[in-house]
Amino acid sequence: MQPPSPPPDDRQASDPQTWLGTYGDYLYRYALLQVRDESLAEDLVQETLLAALKGRDGFDGRASERTWLTGILKHKIIDQLRRQYREVPMEEGNPDGEGEDFGMEEFFAADGHWATKPGAWNDPAKSTENAHFWEVLLGCLERLSPRQRQLFVLRELHGSGNAEICKGMDITPTNAGVMLYRARMSLRQCLELNWFGQPRKTEKR
Amino acid sequence: MLNCQKASQLLSQSLDRPLSFRERLSLRLHLLMCDACRRFAKQLRSLRPMAAELESRVLTDDRFKLDERARKRIKRVLHDGGEQGPVS
């Protein structure tokens, strides 16, 4: 008979040589969602496993091994994004301090009314059962600017807290809010145009 | 008075922070009168569960795999990992 699993404080991470086989693809996909570059994603997996190897004692057995490794990877991703932000502080045409209204002519008229009113979405619940829908959503995500996409993936796909993101990336909540707003606006519109049907026609300016 | 643009901003912000009483009130008033924004609000909120499901689909998608070359390289680095300094 197998002995019961040891209490949490005695638990250790399993043999590091098995990590790559067990979690390699999972970590790779997680990284790929964020960086969209295969060799960068591979590097992140490597760095993550290496850091895990060196920090093995830090694994306290409370979380699953996969959660622990994913946490390390997420830190690496956020670190990398913060470095990028330092080098090129703000998005093209969206310097720090530009408010939420900046560059939104695509969505709103000068008086703040919708340029094109949001259209009716037919049967969203049914759409999500369709495999092709997820390809469209992935495609819409790709079309965001890199920073909007990165932030959106962290916030909504990985479910990171807003405070965690702002602290880790050293950006203000206002700034994060502006980029998330733009990302959500673009994604909603992209889904409408490419999946949920045509928007109501209004005059193009 | 809130316009649609401002209402859309508040709706997005409400996904990231609690709105103030005043913000909630003005948003609610706007939504009462504006069916386009009501529709938008519903669609905007649906993005979050969609995004979460997209993640779990991609994380189990066998089309995305570490290739053999990368796997070998990582294996080697992990094997040498103990002796060498951190990879920058």
Image (cartoon, coloured by chain):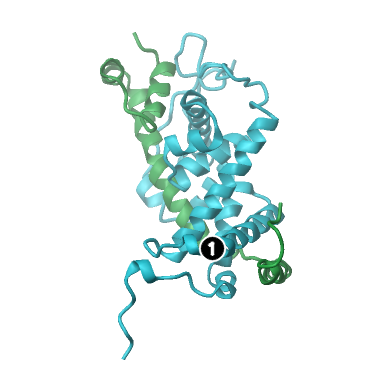
Residue A74 in picture, x, y percent from top left: 53, 50
Apparent side of residue B22 relative to residue A91 in the rendered image (left or right): left
SS class of the residue under badge 1?
A: helix
Which residue lies at the image location 60% right of the left edge and 37% below the top edge?
A: A82
Chain of the residue under label 1 = A
Apparent side of residue B88 relative to residue A105 in the rendered image (left or right): right
- Please tell me the colour of chain A: cyan
Is residue B85 placed above or below A108 in the rendered structure? below
Q: Which residue type does callout 1 highlight? A: Tyr
**Viewer-proximal residue among A46 and A191:** A46
Q: Quadrant of residue A43?
A: bottom right
- Please tell me the colour of chain B: green
- Residue A142 visible in this rendered orientation of the protein: no
**Viewer-proximal residue among A149 and A78:** A78
| Residue underneath mark 1 | A26
- Residue B76 visible in this rendered orientation of the protein: yes
Which residue lies at the image location 44% right of the left edge and 24% below the top edge?
A: A117
